[in-house]
Image: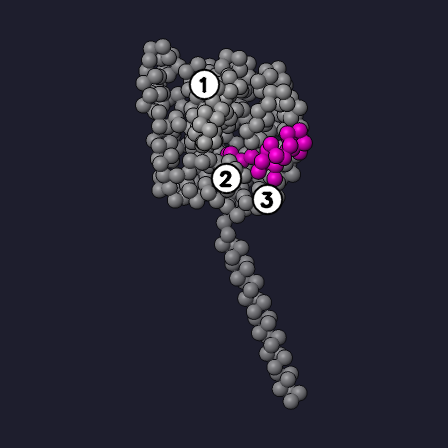
Amino acid sequence: MQNSHLHTSRRSLLQALTASAASTIISKTALAATPKPYRIDAHGHFMSPVMIDVLGAQELGLFANWSATKHLESMDENGIASTLLSIPPHYDPELVDRLARPTNEFGARLASDYPGRFGLMAFLPMPHIDATLREIDYALDTLKVDGVAMYTNYGDQWLGDPTFDPIFDELNHRGATLFVHPISANCCKSLLPNVADTTIEWQTDTTRAIANLLFSGTTTRYPNVCIIFSHGGGTMPYLIERFTAAANNIKYKEYFPQGFAGALHNLFFDTAWTSNAVAMGALRKVAPLTHILLGSDYPARTLVDHVKGLQECGVFTDSELRQIERDNALTLFPRLKT
């Protein structure tokens, strides 16, 4: 009986060791099969403590619950190696001077604490010109951020307004990258009481900003500024026929020596909220493939929405997807190459 018990114990031990070894092999195999994150998200949002303190969690909504830990977990789950962070749309000209510097310092610490995972598009205290110029100097020279962020408009002035020329002159001198996010203008808030501005108006305001930058000659005068527009360029791709006709008008001919298509050479477009067959099919025909960047608008949308949307929209080949998901962003942000 003792020998039988001994044999049974040995068999049990061998079975346990064999199961453990198999489990280890399977675990290592699964780990090896998981691809290393490589995608770059050009449009992600973050929230700074000072903004929560000054504006309040209720005002900021879901953005108040943002955390680096949750963001990184979602990035890892969806193969995102790096995210370019910017603050979510919120504009109060009386508060921007208080918010910009500490928000940028917090964002720069995130980039430092998580090397290669986060980049920063600095928050500028627009429309205050002198304060904005000082913040550009501090953000780019001291904090070493990746670029700057602006809204499509500031109250009743759109990008391309001559008031903002000193800002574009400085960005042009530096060869800086500018990320543009829509926000509701004074003229056009809650025009349809049953439809949120985010549904229609923000896409339209993105198009206004593109139009004003091009037809004011701003992009011609400041050719070294690379501009990323959110959400597939708003409604611009669907208005291409009208834009082309306007660019052929003798009044604007000097700004379009190569026609409207040629004027887009320094404009880039992210895929946030547009990673579907209709929107991507239109953008693909209007913008060079090299100027389309993966964007998610996280946490306003999930990362999986956009990774899955691009993969399934049927517009791009595998090699083209690789360009959109990573390679195109590296032309603007080469430090993210690992």
**Does the rendering let one see residue 38?**
no
Q: Residues within 10 Å of mark 3 (few under 14, many from 20)?
A: few
Residue 268 image point, x, y percent: 44, 28
If you read the primary sequence from the N terminus, does the residue marked by circle 1 or circle 2 appear first? 1
Q: Nearer the viewer, residue 8 or 122?
A: 122
Residue mark closest to the camera, 1 vs 2: 2
User: In the image, is residue 190 above or below residue 164?
Assistant: below
Q: Quadrant of the N terminus?
A: bottom right
The x, y position of residue 251, in whole percent, is: 36, 10
Amino acid type of disc 3?
A: Lys
Query: What is the three-letter code of the residue carrying label 2?
Result: Arg
- The residue to which callout 1 is attached is 213
Q: Is residue 167 visible?
A: yes
User: What residue is disc 3 on?
Assistant: 70
In-image side of 217 versus 104 (left or right): left
Label whose residue precedes the other's in the sequence (2 or 3)? 3
Residue at x 55%, y 14% (from the top left corner): 166
Q: State whether the magenta stretch is mostly helix, strand or loop.
A: helix
State the SS at label 2. Answer: loop
**In magenta segment, residue 47:** yes
**Which residue is depicted at the point 45% across and 41% down?**
306
* Magenta extent: 40-65
Left or right: 54, with 261 as reference point: right
